[in-house]
Amino acid sequence: MQILKREHDLWRLRIRSSDDLWVLARICRKGKHFGMLGERRDQTTGGIEGGRAKAAERKKMWILLYIENTEYQSFSDTLRVHGIIEEAKVDKGSHHTHLVGAGDEIELRSVAGFPTEDQRLLDDAVAAGGKPRIAIAAVESDEVTLYEVANHGIREVHQWTMRGGGKYVGQANSDVRTSFLRNLGKDIDLQLGDDVPLILGGPGLARDQLMELMRADGVSRPISSVATSIGGRPAANEVLAEGLAENIMSGHSLVKEIGLLEQVWRRMGTDGAVAYGEAELVLAMQQGAIEMLLITADLLRHEEASIGGRKWPDWLAELDAIGAEWLQCSTEHDSGAQLESFGGAVALLRFKV
C-alpha cells in the first residue's frame, strides 16, 4: 500500500498488491465513503439517431460511494465495493459497484476519522509494501505440494505426485524419482514470479535433491532447504511457526503472527500463562496480566461483538494503561483458524491469573 495523502478524515491510497485488498476489505466498512475512477452510462448520449436506437455511451468519471458492503475472496485480485453514488457526473443516488485491483488509486473518507485499528492495519500494509510473496514447497519422496505465503495467509497452489492419477506416474525407483523431481522443479520455477523466493521443506532428503536439480538447471531465484518433522501442509505450517529459513522469512509479518499464536498453543498445552474466553480476558485485564493480546481483524470490527459489556476497540484502548500490546490476526492460515475456534481472541500473560 502506498499513501498518497493522509488526513484525519481522508486517505488517498495506491493499491500495490492483493495483500492490500485484504486490508482494504476490512477498512471499507458501511458508513464510510469510497471514491475512485469508474464507468457509468451517460443517458444523455443515447436516444434515436438516423431512425435507429443509439445506446448510451459508457464514460469514465470520478465516482464517490457511500459504502454499503464489500466482497473479497482471499487471494483474489479484485475487491468489490458496493454503495450508493454520492458524487458523480450522472446517476447520483443510484447503486454502483467499484472493482478495485492492484495499481488503482482510491480515496477513503470517514467523517469521524479513522479508528486506531484501521490506522494500524494501514501502517502494517505500508511497512509490508514492496516485499515479494514467498513460496513453500513441501517435498516428500513421491509428492510435492506448493504453497503461496502472503502477508495475511497461506494457500495451496499446486500438487505433483508419483502415486498415480497425477501428472507424473511411474515406478518409484531412483531414475524415475530424479526425472520426477527435475520436471517438477521446472514447473515450480514457471509457476512463480521472478522475484519470489522458494523454501523447500520436508522430512527426508528429497528436498535437497530437488534444490540441487533446480540449481543444475539454472534456476537463479533464492532457494533454501530446511528440515521439517512432517510433510504436506503441516510442513509449510512448521516452517512458518518455527521461523525456519530465517534468511528468507526474516521480517515477514505472517511469521511474527503465527509465532505468537504458536506460543499460545504451547502454553495451553502446559497450563501456562495464557487467557481466552471473556471471563479470563476481563480478569487478566483487571489484574494487569496481559502482555500481548491476539485478536482476529474481523472480530475487532464486528458491530455486535463485545467484551465486558464494551465494544472491542474501546476495551483494547485500556491495554496501553497496563503496558500491553495487541495484534490483529488473519484467519487465512491454520493458526488463525484455530484462534477463531477459541472465540477470536487470546492473550499471552505475564503471570497466571
Image: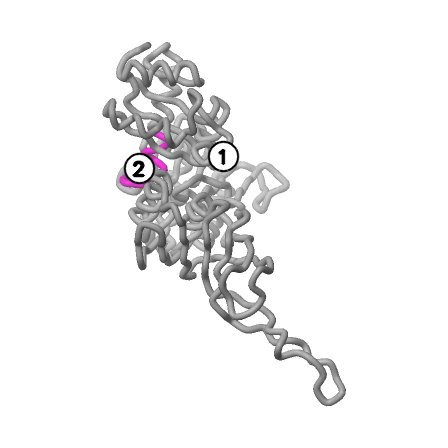
Residue 136 screen position, x and y as percent: 41, 41
Residue 5 screen position, x and y as percent: 31, 58
Is residue 270 found left or right of 92 in the rendered image? Answer: left
**In front: mark 1 or mark 2?**
1
Q: Residue at the spot x=60%, y=71% of the render?
A: 41
Q: Where, by quadrant of the figure, is residue 289 drawn?
A: top left
Q: Residue at the spot x=45%, y=50% of the render?
A: 21
The circle drawn on residue 103 is none
For label 2, the SS is loop
Q: Where, by quadrant of the figure, is residue 118 drawn?
A: top left
* Badge 2: residue crowd in 10 Å (few <14, some 14–19, many ≥20): some
Is residue 210 found left or right of 46 in the rendered image? Answer: left
Residue 173 screen position, x and y as percent: 51, 37
Residue 317 screen position, x and y as percent: 32, 30
The circle drawn on residue 303 is 1
Magenta region includes residue 256:
yes
Q: Is residue 97 visible?
A: yes
Magenta region includes residue 35:
no
* Badge 1: residue crowd in 10 Å (few <14, some 14–19, many ≥20): few
Q: Nearer the viewer, residue 348 or 180?
A: 348
**Which secondary structure is most common in the magenta stretch?**
helix
Q: Amino acid at mark 1?
A: Glu
Q: Amino acid at mark 2?
A: Ala
Q: Nearer the viewer, residue 192 or 220?
A: 192
- Magenta residues span 250-259
The circle drawn on residue 245 is 2
Q: How is the image coloured?
A: one colour
Q: Residue at the spot x=62%, y=39% of the render?
A: 164
Q: Residue at the spot x=43%, y=36% of the render?
A: 297
Which quarter of the rendering shows the C terminus? top left
Q: Nearer the viewer, residue 58 or 8?
A: 8
